[in-house]
Every structure is written in C-alpha cells, then in structure tokens.
Amino acid sequence: MHKLTKTFIYAVAVVLVLLLDSSYVAADAGVQVDTPLEDMQEGVPAGLILENQNLPYIFWVELRAGLLHLLERTEEGNYLKRISTSISIGKEGFGKQVEGDRKTPVGIYQITSFLKDEKLDDYYGVGAYPLNYPNSWDRLSGRTGHGIWLHGLPKGIETRPLLDSKGCVIVDNRTLQKFADFIEAGETLFVLSESLDWLEPGTIQPSADILEATESWRAYWQNNNISEYLSSYHLDFTDSKRNLKQWETYKTRVNGLKTYIRISLSKMSVIAYPGEENLVAMRFYQDYESSNFNWSGWKHLLWRRDDAGAWRILYEGNG
C-alpha cells in the first residue's frame, strides 16, 4: 500500500510539472475576481506610456495566462487591477494572421460599440463588444479576418476551456454585464498581449521619449517648418494611399498655401505595440485650424524607432 501511495504521488507530481510547463495555462472562462480595495497593489503596465486622461479604465488581456484585467488609473497615475477574470480565446491560440485561422489577435484595439442580447444568437450570451480588428497595423502587416468581439457565454453555461473560440475573447455573462459601467464605446482601449508585466510606480517607460518627439512634430507642423516637419516621417511611411515621397509632395503643396496653422492634441493614448520591437501606437483627438481649412477628429499614428534611435512616423490616419 505504501508503494502504491508513493507511485500515485509521483504520478501526480509529473502531471503538475507537465501542466506548468505547458504553452498555455489551463483556464475556464467564468472565474472572476473583484479585488478588495485594501488588497490592491499599484503599478504601471509595461508599455503603457500614456493613457487618455478622460478615461480612467483600460482592458488588458494576458493571452498566454488566459486572463482579462480591468485596470483602473489612480490619481497618482499608477494602475490597479479592478477586476480580473479568466477567459476563452481562439481554439488555435493567439497571433491571428488570416481569416478563419481560429486565433485571437495580438494588438491594441478600441471597443467600437455594444450589441444587445436580443440582436444576437444565444451563443454570444448577454451581449457583445466588437473590436476594431483589423486595425491599421494589422492591415499594414497583411492580416485578414473580421468579427473579433468580447462577448459572453451561452445562457446556462458557466465556464469554457481556454482555447475554445473562433478568435473572440469570451467571459462569463455576469462579468460582461459588470464591464458596461467602465466602457466608453469608440474610446475604451482593449489590449491583447501575450502577458502583462508590471513596473514599479513612477518607473519611466523605455519608450517615453516618444512624447518629446510627438511635441516636436506638432510644433514643426504648427510653425509650418516643412523640412523639420517632414523629417519626422519614416522612410517606410504610408497613409494607406501615399508613400513618403508622395506625402512630401502633398504636404509641401498644401502647407505652402497657409498663412497660419494652430494644432492642439488631447485625449492621447500611447502604448508600445504588443509583440513588436520599437513600434508604438498613438491615438489622440486633434483640433486643427488654419487660414484656409479647419478640422477636428481622432487621429492614429504608428511610430517606429529608426536605426539611429530616433522616433519616426510609420503610419498616419484618421479614426
């Protein structure tokens, strides 16, 4: 009997080792935790350089661990895990590339809207929040597909395995309903990353110098310093219609007709792009006024650090 017990313990130990060494941590969508305020620890997510100051919440998915965190910004500019919940992601894991690969994408997305229960099949639970996949980086990278949502479980189902969706992120219905109070459609960010690494409060992010590069770009543009303004753009720049040479021709012509330009940027978010080196995604609300044209709206930039260490704009677009 003693021998059997030892054999059994050894077998259990082997199984545990295999599980811990697995590429994915086993998890079921449906385990949700509200962290008591007194137990919350403050920190700064690695890569989160700046977040829209009008929105104190951001969603961050740890794809490998199968966890979704609702992060709340404190008055000091640090973050707390307000809610953490287990999730289901694509049956084939993460790193979506093509339509139908059953993978969840890696990237930075906006929650675009809310689809109500009565407009959906029961498969989606009590509602769904579509994400703007494919985003600009996905399109530049040649990724295809559509219909990546955050949604609930079929009614009566409490849990699902980690790898169990067609690419969407799935949570239990009770948690999905809780999230409604923290989401501003069209603005709330949803980060899909392999992991969530925490930095100590007050830590300066490695890519924080991009904020200085952004202000220089804005000032060059506003002062109509066309040569310095254009030097802010990467050799591989595109706006999805023009390459760098075409952009230079266009901007030189347009700005040459102006007697003054005024530009202000607000509601800015700046995040190092998950899974990429030296790539930062930036989104802000731009108010533009000039002698012959005015415009206000959302703008999206992708910045790439070049070989000399300088930040250059790789992509610029509205939305």
Image (cartoon, helix red, strand yellow):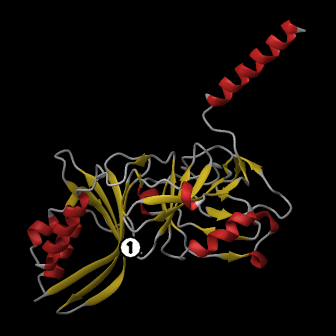
Left or right of 242: which side holds 233?
A: left
**From this viewpoint, is residue 258 visible?**
no
| Secondary structure under the numbered disc 1 in the rendered image | loop
| Residue neighbourhood size for the residue with mark 1, other residues' Cα within 10 Å, grouped as few (<14), some (14–19), many (≥20) | few
Residue 178: x percent and y percent? 66, 69
Residue 213: x percent and y percent? 20, 62
**From this viewpoint, is residue 97 visible?**
yes
Q: Residue furthest top?
A: 3
Q: Quadrant of the N terminus?
A: top right
Q: Residue at x 42, y 75 (%)?
A: 319
Front residue of 289 and 170: 170
Q: How many marks?
A: 1
Q: Residue furthest front?
A: 38
Residue 180: x percent and y percent? 63, 74
Front residue of 285 and 241: 285
Can you tell which quarter of the image residue 237 is in?
A: bottom left
Q: Residue at x 62, y 44 (%)?
A: 93
Q: Is residue 319 shown above or below 142? A: below
Q: Which residue is mark 1?
A: 53
Q: Amino acid at mark 1?
A: Gln
Q: Residue furthest right?
A: 1
Can you tell which quarter of the image residue 9 is in?
A: top right
Residue 224: x percent and y percent? 11, 78
